[in-house]
């Protein structure tokens, strides 16, 4: 990243209102906002609906393009676009995951995945869009394979966590799945041939408090060369910056970490290059204190070349921001 | 003169002096050369009562334990048997359906059903507390959930013991 050593500021681009309960999560459509396709964002809420927002190319302002309702019967907790941008997965407390297809601007629920015994907490597509992972309060992680005709088959049910699984996330380039749980561990899952998924590593840093950000690394060149699994190790902890629970972190393409917390603030961190410490270290470049009126549940960078960020809050709104360097 | 006795009781009556107060003792004249028997039979008596009480308790305990164990065993065995039986039934039906029309089911579902068949055939189910059996049932349970999710099937039979008031359950 071209370093800008000066100050930064967070500009509020627009506040998206419409949800009638807290907004849990936002997701940028990866196929939109490029090549003339207007930018698109999904948000999901305690009001049991999902809203799809689109940016008007001429006015640059955002409007609500669709409300996906009458499907989930409880809070929608998580939403994720497939890499092609054609499908949207939504995970709900009603124990189902719905798959929506964008059919010429209309969103249609084309499949409902059942299997979890109770609340689904997180959904995530792998890099190629061939697999979808879901996890929930029943302590299990499910891997679904996408088949032609929007058919989904359960490839594996992964057990191992001893408490609620809060989130699942795929590695950006390899089919390795990360899951994190209230049991204070992160588990890493990989496939050993046909549908044979198992836990290849468990990360447990027992000084668990929810006021720190931890950074882990592996030798990914070595992993990708197929030499077998290379374990992840903990390299850095960012502490002292948050005094309320951190609910969300996201890394931008340039390496800027954004965090959203229970103190209604959004913070930004970059790697500090002072080189005096073993391993990477980070410094905070900006704290936007009253980003929302209530807890910030989710922060997500857009996929494009810009520095746009979306945030979701207990205050029922989604905000679009731009991080700009102050010359 | 008593042999080996430290008692100062009079020789005619065992109830005087230092005989144990909560034991009944026969009131009879003691023959002079069985004087040590007064204490010995008291000690024996305590042990006799102890042994009698112990064997009574043991006998009752064994009987009660057996009956309770029988109930627990029936319940556990029934639960395991019922669950394994459910999987056998599902696998039987699905196996037949696959053989009748293999194109109807995906390769993955067919493989899962075959794996479940192998699990069921491979392990005995006569020892429900055996760890291997527990593991097998666990594997079957997971595979079954995955297959059901893939086929969009729902489990309606929640088992005899679930959703039933425990007092009404009889074996």
Image (cartoon, coloured by chain):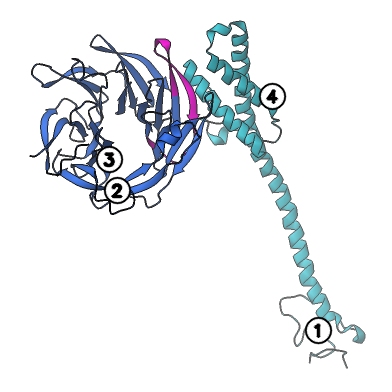
Chain colours: A blue, B cyan
Subunit of mark 1?
B
Subunit of mark 2?
A
Instruction: Point out the tag, 2 or 3, that comes first from the N-terminus.
Output: 2
- The residue at which mark 4 appears reads as B121
Mark-to-mark CA distance, 4 and 2: 51 Å
* Residue A162 visible in the snapshot: no
Helix, strand or loop at mark 4: helix
* Residue A125 visible in the snapshot: yes
- The residue at which mark 3 appears reads as A247
- The residue at which mark 2 appears reads as A212
Mark-to-mark CA distance, 3 and 4: 48 Å
- The residue at which mark 1 appears reads as B14
Q: Nearer the viewer, residue A151 or A139?
A: A151
Helix, strand or loop at mark 1: loop
**Figure check: A223 above or below A289:** above
Of the 4 image quadrants, the one containing the N terminus of chain A is top left
Residue sitting farthest toward the bottom: B1
Looking at the rendering, the stretch of residues picked out in magenta corresponds to A144-167
Residue A230 in the image: x percent, y percent? 46, 39
Say if the magenta span includes residue B154. Answer: no
Mark-to-mark CA distance, 1 and 2: 84 Å
- Do labels 3 and 1 touch, CB within 8 Å? no
Are the residues under badges 1 and 2 in a single subunit?
no
Q: Nearer the viewer, residue A320 or A231?
A: A231
Residue B159 in the image: x percent, y percent? 56, 27
Q: Residue at the spot x=56%, y=36% of the render?
A: B167
Number of other residues with Cα within 10 Å of mark 4, as a class: few under 14, some 14 to 19, many 20 or more: few
Q: Which one is in front in this view, the residue at disc 1 or the one at disc 4?
A: 4
């Amino acid at each position: 990243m071209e370093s800008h050593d000066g100050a930064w500021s967070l500009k509020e681009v627009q506040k998206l209102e419409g949800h009638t309960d807290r907004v849990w999560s936002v997701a940028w459509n990866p196929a939109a906002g490029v090549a003339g396709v207007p930018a698109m964002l999904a948000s999901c809420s305690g009001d049991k609906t999902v809203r799809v927002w689109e940016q008007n190319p001429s006015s640059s302002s955002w409007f609500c393009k669709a409300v996906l309702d009458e499907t989930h019967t409880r809070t929608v907790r998580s939403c994720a676009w497939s890499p092609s941008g054609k499908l949207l997965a939504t995970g709900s407390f009603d124990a189902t995951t719905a798959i929506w297809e964008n059919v010429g601007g209309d969103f249609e629920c084309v499949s409902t995945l059942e299997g979890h015994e109770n609340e689904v907490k997180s959904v995530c597509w792998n890099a190629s869009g061939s697999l979808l992972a879901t996890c929930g309060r029943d302590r299990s992680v499910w891997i679904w394979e996408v088949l032609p005709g929007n058919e989904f088959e359960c490839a594996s049910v992964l057990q191992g966590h001893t408490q609620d699984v809060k989130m699942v996330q795929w590695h950006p380039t390899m089919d390795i799945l990360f899951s994190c749980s209230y049991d204070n561990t992160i588990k890493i899952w990989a496939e050993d041939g046909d549908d044979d998924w198992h836990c290849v590593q468990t990360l447990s840093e027992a000084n668990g408090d929810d006021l720190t950000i931890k950074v882990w690394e592996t030798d990914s060149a070595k992993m990708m060369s197929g030499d077998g699994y290379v374990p992840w190790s903990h390299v850095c902890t960012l502490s002292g910056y948050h005094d309320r629970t951190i609910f969300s972190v996201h890394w931008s393409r340039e390496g800027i970490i954004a965090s959203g917390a229970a103190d209604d603030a959004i913070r930004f961190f970059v790697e500090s290059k002072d080189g005096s410490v073993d391993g990477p270290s980070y410094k905070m470049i900006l704290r936007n204190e009253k980003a929302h009126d209530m807890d910030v549940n989710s922060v997500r960078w857009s996929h494009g070349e810009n520095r746009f960020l979306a945030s979701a809050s207990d205050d029922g709104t989604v905000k679009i921001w731009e991080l700009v360097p102050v010359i | 003169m008593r042999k080996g006795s430290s008692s100062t009781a009079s020789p005619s009556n065992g109830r005087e002096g230092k005989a144990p107060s909560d034991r009944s003792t026969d009131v009879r004249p003691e023959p002079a050369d069985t004087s040590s028997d007064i204490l010995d039979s008291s000690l024996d008596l305590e042990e006799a009562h102890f042994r009698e009480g112990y064997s009574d308790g043991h006998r009752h305990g064994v009987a009660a334990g057996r009956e309770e164990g029988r109930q627990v065993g029936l319940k556990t065995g029934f639960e395991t048997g019922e669950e394994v039986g459910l999987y056998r039934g599902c696998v039987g039906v699905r196996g037949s359906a696959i053989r009748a029309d293999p194109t109807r089911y995906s390769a993955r579902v067919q493989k899962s059903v075959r794996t479940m068949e192998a699990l069921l055939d491979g392990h005995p189910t006569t020892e429900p507390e055996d760890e291997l059996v527990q593991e097998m049932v666990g594997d079957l349970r997971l595979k079954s959930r995955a297959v059901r999710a893939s086929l969009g099937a729902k489990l309606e039979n929640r088992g005899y013991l679930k959703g039933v008031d425990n007092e009404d359950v009889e074996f």
